[in-house]
Image (spheres, rainbow, N blue to C red):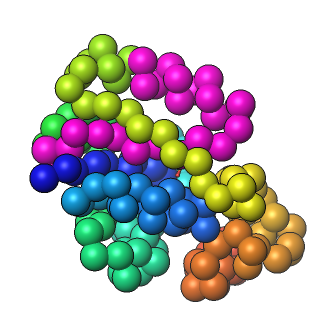
Amino acid sequence: MRIGVYPGTFDPITLGHLDIIRRGSALADKLVIGVTTNSAKSPMFDVEKRLEMVRRETADIDNVEVVSFNSLLMDFAVAHNASFVLRGLRAVADFEYEYQMAGMNQQLNDDVETVFLMADVSLQPIASRLVKEIARYGGPIDKFVPAEVARDVAAALAGEQS
Ligand code: ADP
């Protein structure tokens, strides 16, 4: 059984993430999405809400499981019997960080490969950080996130302001 893990903050999940999940899940028997509880990024959504959003948006994909994690990525991969870590690559800006992380993870555990996929060209510029920034200034985000996630972002912003 070929198992992959796809780690990320997913704050919130975007159409870019979902495209990587669809492509990645087609390459594996099972894809475990790991929502990191790492709070260093001071996320807009707590981990329970991020898990709920990722589960809801991937409910139609049979071989996807969604869990939270707070450990070394390689330990998380081994705990789930994964043979690969899935990461999405956007532009040159992602490359340096991903290159370094993949290189260090390879030294921590050479049995687990890092696999990079590219999202559909139209979805590549999407980043959770920019989605939140656009929404904070009242801009439309429905081209970048699923409709229900756009509502979740609006509700979170309304909560911040009250
Ligand atoms: P992290 O905090 O690990 O960067 P993110 O939720 O921002 O978590 O991203 C998780 C993964 O999804 C990363 O590999 C990131 O490069 C990838 N990713 C995010 N958005 C896109 C996109 N629009 N196209 C391709 N890959 C993406």
Residue at 45% x, 25% y: name it. 101
Q: Residue at x 60, y 79 (%)?
A: 146
| Residue 125 located left or right of residue 67 | right
Q: Is residue 75 magenta?
A: no
Q: How many marks?
A: 0
- Is 99 within the magenta? yes
Viewer-proximal residue among 56 and 24: 24
Where is 123 relative to 88, above or below?
below
Query: Along the line of sight, which residue is nearer the eye, 133 or 27?
Result: 27
Kindly identify the residue that appears in the image at 38 percent across and 50 percent down: 6
- Using residue 7 as the reference point, say whether residue 15 is left or right of it: right
**Looking at the image, which residue sits at the far front?**
27
**Can the viewer see residue 38?**
no
Where is residue 66 shown, x and y percent of the image? 30, 65
Q: Quadrant of residue 96?
A: top right
- Residue 158 point in image, percent of width and height: 69, 80
Q: Could you say which quadrant of the image residue 131 lies in?
A: bottom right
- Residue 27 visible somewhere in the drawing: yes
Percent x, y of residue 91: 71, 38
Q: Position of residue 120 (x, y in %)?
A: 65, 58
Which quarter of the picture shows residue 67? bottom left
Instruction: Look at 57% across and 26% down and name the residue there.
Output: 97
Q: Report the span colored magenta.
A: 80-103
Quick one: quadrant of the C terminus? bottom right
